[in-house]
Image (cartoon, rainbow, N blue to C red):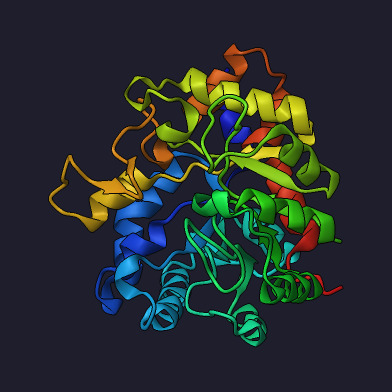
């Protein structure tokens, strides 16, 4: 039965921006808001491992970006400390295993585009000391480290500071995330990487020709490093007609990534923007958009974590074996984080 299989599976989500929503509340409400608003969703969805990206919105850039980054990191620590019965902020594989053994959700801190660092690569170890274990170096546009995928026309590779950032991250045991990185930048990373590379929330460009998605060559390159590609659920990245998206579109992308990169190199990076936007724009505005995308279009039943059992059910219907489903739903990402997080080179 799908429900039984889902309960037996360590479900791992590589990208949920819930820190944006929680940190928007007063600090004294961080722990309670997470417990009331987000913990029930994660629990109902069967999430056992949750990556928490720190994303700093445009209103804080550039002057307040580092301050907001630190505020969101502090928020993650506070919500974990205030919900110790249910979650644990993890910095390495043994901590993840202990959290799972104690039936707590393992939380892992990530940075999305390293907001606020600019070219100060020497601050990456500082953020590592604060618990950050995954990071990307660009979002949609240009940073001091690289160009995001929205700037693909430039053909830009990593800057010298970006190359240095990759080296520092690999030396510390901080996973490099290529989601949002420009195409030439992804190629540059794959040329230089000596450790596994992660894509926390990217779908297949062969099925949806959007600059945020990964080509087959990129999928194969990430797999060759031992990394994992976590498929994005956002409708605009799955099909050209976002309003007509179905769960079959998502499974098509998962199946494509598995076919190209291998079944051991695919995971889930849902990117539940719609649910986060509901928290950030009360009352909900139906016209909310982000970076030109329709963030309110979602797979029916999959606009938040509680819908994740539907993915297990859909994968079964599409003929995936139970052991393959366990890998896709979280086993592959769990394996990668266990082996790499906090392990110095």
Q: Quadrant of the N terminus?
A: top right
| Rendering quarter of residue 56 | bottom left
Q: Residue at x 50, y 60 (%)?
A: 52
Q: Position of residue 126 (x, y in %)?
A: 62, 86
Farthest residue to the left: give it. Answer: 283
On the image, the x and y values in percent for residue 170 come to 78, 69
Quadrant in the picture for residue 37: bottom left
Q: Is residue 2 visible?
A: no
For the C terminus, the quadrant is bottom right
Number of numbered labels in the structure image: 0
Up the image or down, 271 lies above or below 322; here it is below
At 18% from the left and 41% from the top, the residue drawn is 287
The residue sitting at 50% across, 18% down in the picture is 248
Above or below for 47 versus 168: above
Q: Position of residue 21 (x, y in %)?
A: 32, 60
- Tell whether 116 sits left or right of 326: left
Give the vertical position of 165 relative to 178 (above or below).
below
- Asked if residue 50 can be seen in this view, the reply is yes
On the image, the x and y values in percent for residue 181 come to 60, 55
Q: Which of the pair 176/313 is nearer the observer? A: 176
Closest to the observer, 89 or 151: 151
Using residue 119 as the reference point, say whether residue 276 is left or right of it.
left
Residue under the point 40% across and 63% down: 19
């Amino acid at each position: 039965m799908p429900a039984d299989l889902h309960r037996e599976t360590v479900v791992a989500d590589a990208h949920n921006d819930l820190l944006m929503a929680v940190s928007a509340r007063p600090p004294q409400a961080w722990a309670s808001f997470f417990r009331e608003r987000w913990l029930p969703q994660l629990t109902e969805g069967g999430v056992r491992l949750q990556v928490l990206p720190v994303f700093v919105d445009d209103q804080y850039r550039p002057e307040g970006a580092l301050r907001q980054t630190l505020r969101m990191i502090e928020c993650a620590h506070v919500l974990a400390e205030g919900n110790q019965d249910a979650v644990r902020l993890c910095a390495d594989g043994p901590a993840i295993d202990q959290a799972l053994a104690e039936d707590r959700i393992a939380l892992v801190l990530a940075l999305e585009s390293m907001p606020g660092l600019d070219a100060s690569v020497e601050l990456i170890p500082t953020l590592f000391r604060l618990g950050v274990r995954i990071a990307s170096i660009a979002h949609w546009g240009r940073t001091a480290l690289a160009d995001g995928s929205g700037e693909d026309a430039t053909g830009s590779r990593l800057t010298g500071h970006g190359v240095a950032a990759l080296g520092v991250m690999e030396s510390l045991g901080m996973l490099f995330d290529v989601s949002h990185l420009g195409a030439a930048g992804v190629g540059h990373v794959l040329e230089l990487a000596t450790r596994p590379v992660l894509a926390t929330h990217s779908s297949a460009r062969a099925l949806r020709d959007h600059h945020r998605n990964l080509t087959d060559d990129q999928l194969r390159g990430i797999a060759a490093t031992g990394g994992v590609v976590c498929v994005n659920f956002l409708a605009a990245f799955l099909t050209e007609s976002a309003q007509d998206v179905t769960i079959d579109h998502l499974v098509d992308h998962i199946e494509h990534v598995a076919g190209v990169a291998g079944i051991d190199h695919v995971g889930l990076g849902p990117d539940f923007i719609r649910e986060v936007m509901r928290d950030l724009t009360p009352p909900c505005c139906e016209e909310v958009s982000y970076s030109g995308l329709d963030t309110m279009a979602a797979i029916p039943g999959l606009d938040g974590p509680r819908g994740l059992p539907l993915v297990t059910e859909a994968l079964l219907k599409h003929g995936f074996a139970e052991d393959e489903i366990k890998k896709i739903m979280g086993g592959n990402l769990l394996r990668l984080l266990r082996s790499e997080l906090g392990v110095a080179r």
